[in-house]
Image (cartoon, rainbow, N blue to C red):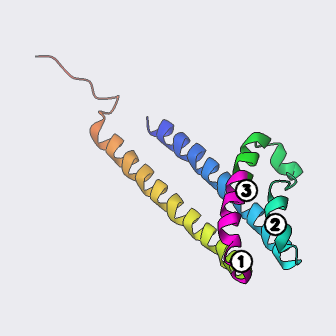
Amino acid sequence: MKIALWIVFALVAALWTGTVLVSVELTGWLATTVASGQAGDVITNIGQWPVPAWLALWIDPVWIQGLQAAWVQVMNWLGQTGPALGSVVSWLIPLMWVVWAVVLLVMLAATVAGHFLIGKFSRPSGLKRVSA
């Protein structure tokens, strides 16, 4: 049971890390686009972001299109702020990694607590109940 708990933790942690990594890549691309002076075309370009070759091997392109659509909505909202967009992107990537670390630590703490609870409430297989 403990092994299954750690396997689930590893899978969820890998999915969480992949999601943040894709978001960071997309944000980095966005920052480059904004810095190059193409801020007017950013919203259009987000929907046409080329999927990196390493990413296409691991993630379904349909999922990436959903992430791109979410970023288009975010950019429509941020586009109203005008020149502040460049400064928002500059602190967004470190914030994303901080949120990643906090969520991963919470998941790790829950897994460690589950590990000890499983050990406390399960009977060792070597001890058998003797009937009187």
Count neighbours of disc 1 (C-alpha within 10 A) and say few if under 14, some if 14 to 19, many if 20 or more: some
Along the line of sight, which residue is nearer the eye, 14 or 92?
Answer: 92
Q: Are marks 1 and 3 in contact (CB under 8 Å)?
A: no
Can residue 4 be seen here? The reply is yes
| Mark whose residue sits in front, 1 or 3 | 1
Residue 42, labelled with which disc? 2
Residue 85, labelled with which disc? 1
Q: Position of residue 4 (x, y in %)?
A: 50, 36
Q: CA distance from mark 2 to mark 1?
A: 11 Å
Can residue 60 be seen here? The reply is no
Q: Position of residue 82 (x, y in %)?
A: 72, 79
Q: Position of residue 130 (x, y in %)?
A: 18, 20
Residue at 10% over, 16% down: 132
| Amino acid type, callout 3 | Val
- Please give left or right for residue 97 compared with residue 50 in the image: left
Residue at 82% over, 75% down: 34
Q: How many marks?
A: 3
- What kind of element bears circle 2? helix
- Please give left or right for residue 27 compared with residue 17 in the image: right
Residue at 47% over, 40% down: 5
Q: Main secondary structure of the magenta part?
A: helix
| Amino acid type, callout 2 | Val
- What kind of element bears circle 3? helix
